[in-house]
Amino acid sequence: MYQPKHFQQHDPATLHALMRAHPLATLVRTGADGVPVADVMPLELVADAGPHGTLRGHVARANPLWREADGQTVLLLFHGPQGYVSPGWYPSKAQDPRVVPTWNYALAQARGPLRAVEDAAWLRAELTRLSSRHEAAVGGDWSLADAPADYVEKMLGAIVGIEILIESLEGKFKLSQNQPGVNRDGVERGLEGLGAAALLASMRATR
């Protein structure tokens, strides 16, 4: 990943926070024919499992990912807040019109070997944790126990767990750090006017 120095983000807590807030990851691997393949799936971060944490999730048994990528080092991309930045938001434009639009964003990138998990107890525990966390986030109270036992067993048989021990973790937070303070203020006012609260909060956090 191209990494200008002022956009680099290496703080584990900051990267973990982005991964938890935006758990829908893009998983990039090499397919059986040698061609890159991308899948999208929510992943649970276990921060204290390994030096950079561990990611856990599941895929449909029909998905070739778990067979083809078992033991393969994969790339995970977690996209945080993002949005267009108008050069009209830069107060400096009045003195120097040599400005162009750009795009601000926050991204966490992880790499590690993928392990396929065909263990019903592991899957049940993972699904219980995953649903509990996300139900709480939306104010719901659904649990795995609410579904008929035979239906749950059937569903467990239709999925395979995946686990990735993170071996490297880095981030790119491109949030106008390369602009003078007056222009960063202008971008924040522009985002505030659009109601882009998440991107605005990310920018303010890098101050």
Image (tube, helix red, strand yellow):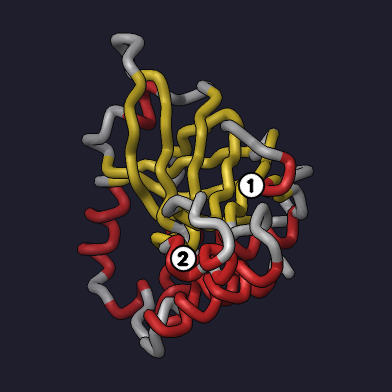
Q: Is mark 1 on a helix, strand or loop?
A: strand
Label 1 Cα crowd, 10 Å radius (few <14 / some 14-19 / many 20+) = many
Question: Residue tagged by mark 1?
Answer: 171
Is 64 displayed left or right of 6 in the figure?
left
Q: Which amino acid does label 2 sit on?
A: Leu
Residue at 54%, 50% in the rendered image: 107
In the picture as drawn, the residue positioned furthest to the top comes out as 33
User: Residue 23, percent across and down?
Assistant: 47, 59
> Is residue 136 in sight in this rendering?
no
The residue mark sitting in front, 2 or 1, is: 1
Q: Residue 130 carries which label?
A: 2
Residue at 67%, 48% in the rendered image: 7
Q: Quadrant of the C terminus?
A: bottom right
Residue at 37%, 21% in the rendered image: 68
Vertical arrangement, residue 155 with respect to residue 29, above or below: below
User: Residue 42, percent across and down?
Assistant: 41, 55
Q: Which amino acid does label 1 sit on?
A: Gly
Vertical arrangement, residue 3 with respect to residue 10, above or below: above
Gap between marks 2 and 1, in whole Å? 24 Å
Is 109 displayed left or right of 34 in the figure?
right
Pick whichever, 80 or 134, lies toward us: 80
Residue at 72%, 47% in the rendered image: 6
